[in-house]
Amino acid sequence: MASVGIHDVRKSFGPVEIIHGVDISIEDGEFVILVGPSGCGKSTLLRMIAGLEKITSGEISIGERVVNQMPPKERDIAMVFQNYALYPHMTVSENMAFSLRLRRTENSIVTERVHIAAEILGLMPLLDRYPRQLSGGQRQRVAMGRAIVRDPQVFLFDEPLSNLDAKLRVQMRTEIKELHQRLRTTTVYVTHDQIEAMTMADKIVVMHDGIVEQIGAPLELYDNPANRFVAGFIGSPAMNFMSGHITGANGSASLRTEGGIDLPLGAGAPAASDGRPAVYGVRPEHFILSDQGAEASVVVVEPTGSEIQVVADMGGDHVVAVFRERHDLKPGQKIHLQPNPELVHLFDSDNGQRL
Amino acid sequence: MLDAAARQNAVAPVSFWTRLNENRNVLGLWFMLPAAAFLLLFLAYPLGLGIWLSLTDARIGRAGEFIGVENFVWLWGDSVFWLSVFNTLLYTIVASVIKFAIGLYLALLLNNNIAFKAFIRAIVLLPFIVPTVLSAIAFWWIFDSQFSIISWALIELGIIEQNIDFLGTPNNARASVIFANIWRGVPFVAITLLAGLQTVPQSLYEAATIDGASKWAMFRHITYPLLTPIIAVVMTFSVLFTFTDFQLIYAMTRGGPVNATHLMATLSYQRAILGGNLGEGAAISTAMIPFLLSAIMFSWFGLQRRKWQQGESDD
């Protein structure tokens, strides 16, 4: 196992720079997830760690060694690909043994290590099958088995669950996390799915347009997003944003939206900012129904069983609120939504930074 | 009772002809008929006729009589026939092996990212596009005993003193026609294998890179095994085309010198059409069947889906 250091890494394809100086430090044994919308450079960054892409400038180190010029096989990493990249003409056990065979490992050791990995992943009954004869989840497991057999310093996962159906994805999520808890191998995992990131990671790196927006533990990102992008990206349903400007002084400050609605700000509101334009952010789950709340009219009600999701029109802004309790709401009905002032977020209306 | 009668009433008006036409299998036969007729007329009939002729003493202008296997017995003792068998096998084996090697090499090269990729691929196809007789005539000039450009160039370079007699001595002539056949056949092998190479997912090579495979190991353990089904198809066709080759030889050497480049196909033509012995010529053609059949059997086994290709769908 090893730590991974990424220092001011840049990547250009021709004249176009797509990763603009990224710094990430990954501790030994940590499970780090790179998350962001497609095209943000997360997969490219992972492939640079793997050595499948050249680093334009900056430095990547695994353990103590700078690996910039090192070919992939010397980096002591293993990678799980989005489409699994299993060798179709090899059986499950041959697939898993391939890297060891290339290194001319002794037969008995190869068999032993393949069996240990197969045992961990429940692949023992499938060892003689070919990839075509496996289901999606089984192929996924074989791909992980191939990584485990190598006993690498770092596991790299490139959107490993995106080819699976929703139910299997949840199950494999748990399996991967359990595997990490068991093996404690440093893991870098790329996904565009913020739920995967939230549920699995020790540390999340939110990327956007080739830069790192924020790095932190899942709940830290959820509670204290550094900017509007992170606030909107993490959490589902996404945070509500309303533009307006701050009115009133310290203590009793509020934000008046463009639709003329006053929304309360907590004690943490920036001082002496009367009249300043800002974006008000509140998560759907931080609304309560209360007579003191801002008036809104229900547009759509979406019950999921465990909770109820309400889309409402609040002074021209569409807001989403989620309630655990069952409310009998009808479209068109007038309700009063009260945000919890301690849990609201305020962002600069120009650069989106948290105020 | 009433029920049964009603049912009978409902069925009775449908004529036998209508029912026959609506039957799926009968309909299928109808649709197959044009293709079947075509195959029977242009493939099965000539083949059958050829085999029949080989059992007769037919000559041009005289319908033959059945003479059993006499033609074959005669061929068995004919050294020219055996020479043509040897030539055909030599021609097929040497040309096919070299075509495969060069074709695979070219395909691997063209599969890389190189400048002017599409242009180069188009150029590689050129020998395949030119009509065989035209390229044969071009080779005839290239290998001419007096005006050969190769001899001229080598003399100018001071490597040799005299013109090489490419088509005049048996072994030179064999090498020359084999060379021409390779030149003509490589594009087919190269382009088909290139198509096969492009079906191998890039991610397999990336996975192998991380697994620590060298370039050679990737070829040996990934490219080659995944390419075997296509190799089987290509090489079967290549062998069949080469074995039955006629145009190239006939335009360049007409089987000479002293029958050194006579293939079974050219010898058959010479005996049957030029010599007028239809029966004997047909017997030579018929003698090709076992060879071709074994090539087809080889491909049949080669083309069978390998174990790793079987199983569930591609989902």
Image (spheres, coloured by chain):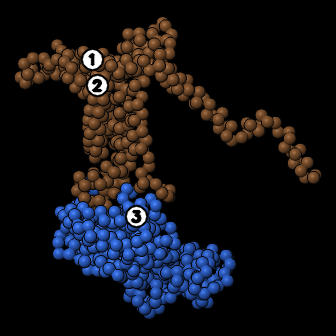
Chain colours: A blue, B brown
- Mark 2 is surrounded, within 10 Å at the Cα level, by few (under 14), some (14 to 19) or many (20 or more) other residues, namely many
Task: Please provide percent x and percent y for residue A149.
Answer: 30, 71
Q: Nearer the viewer, residue A243 or A283?
A: A283
**Disc 1 + disc 2, Cβ < 8 Å:** yes
> Chain under label 1?
B
Residue A229's image quarter?
Answer: bottom left
Residue marked by disc 2: B87
| Residue type, mark 1 in image | Asn
Task: Please provide percent x and percent y for residue A224.
Answer: 39, 83
Task: Please provide percent x and percent y for residue B289.
Answer: 42, 28
Labels 1, 2: one chain: yes
**Disc 2 + disc 3, Cβ < 8 Å:** no
The residue that appears at 42% across and 24% down in the rendered structure is B286
Left-right relation of B164 to B183 = left
Relative to residue A195, is residue A273 depicted above or below?
below
Label of residue B259 in the image: 1
Left-right relation of A93 to B55 = left
Task: Please provide percent x and percent y for residue A112.
Answer: 30, 73
Residue marked by disc 3: A128
The residue that appears at 24% across and 24% down in the rendered structure is B174
